[in-house]
Amino acid sequence: MDLNGKDPLSTLREAARTLVLHGMVIRRISRFYASPCFPAGAGQDYVNAAALVEVREGAAEILAHLHAIEARFGREREQRWGQRVLDLDLLAVEDQVLPDAVTQAAWRTLAPEQQALRAPEQLILPHPRMQDRAFVLVPLAEVAPDWLHPVLNLTVRQMLGRLSPADIAAVTPL
């Protein structure tokens, strides 16, 4: 059970349906995957998925909708990378780099021990650590394998190919 009394798979399925209530049109959604909790020891293992959605709003408005959905499910932002009921990330909006390439690079290359302590005060796109996380790239490869990271100049498929086979194997379909 997770914090809201439902299993994580049910929570994620219900959250995906809630996207539509916020004006998002789901064009594609990946299978659901189990993956080890990140960071290790922060709670139970996760259920992950990726969705390709169509919206008419900008990145900041999309993120506000995602945060509203998280709050609806009982998410409280008390501890960075702490246990949470639901975590909806905005990975990218087409080829936008926000707020700028220098800031995006600074967050992308931030040392792991600093990542655990610091949170950006503004939206960083593409998500600065997506290229490092199998639990992001495995489902994302189902819905947007040829999306090109506008800074790294790598597709999702190429970023996934750079990860260790053990990390990829730890992300299993449900």
Image (spheres, helix red, strand yellow):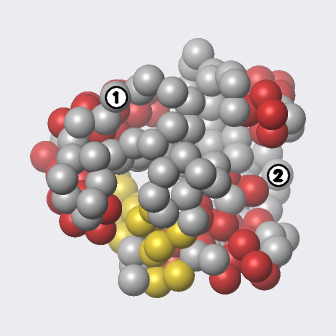
* Residue 126: % across, % down: 64, 43
- Residue 154 vertical placement versus 112 (above, below): below
Q: Nearer the viewer, residue 53 or 107?
A: 107
Q: Which amino acid is tagged 1?
A: Glu
Q: Which amino acid is tagged 2?
A: Leu
Residue at 28% across / 46% down in the picture? 3
* Residue 85: % across, % down: 33, 46
Residue neighbourhood size for the residue with mark 1, other residues' Cα within 10 Å, grouped as few (<14), some (14–19), many (≥20): some
Q: Residue furthest top?
A: 121
* Residue 129: % across, % down: 70, 46
Q: Nearer the viewer, residue 4 or 96?
A: 4
Q: Earlier in the sequence, mark 1 or mark 2?
A: 1
Label 2 SS = loop
Q: Which residue is mark 1?
A: 76
Residue at 73% across / 56% down in the picture? 131
Work out whether residue 145 can be spotted.
yes
Check residue 152 in the rendering and tell me which mark sits there, or answer none: 2
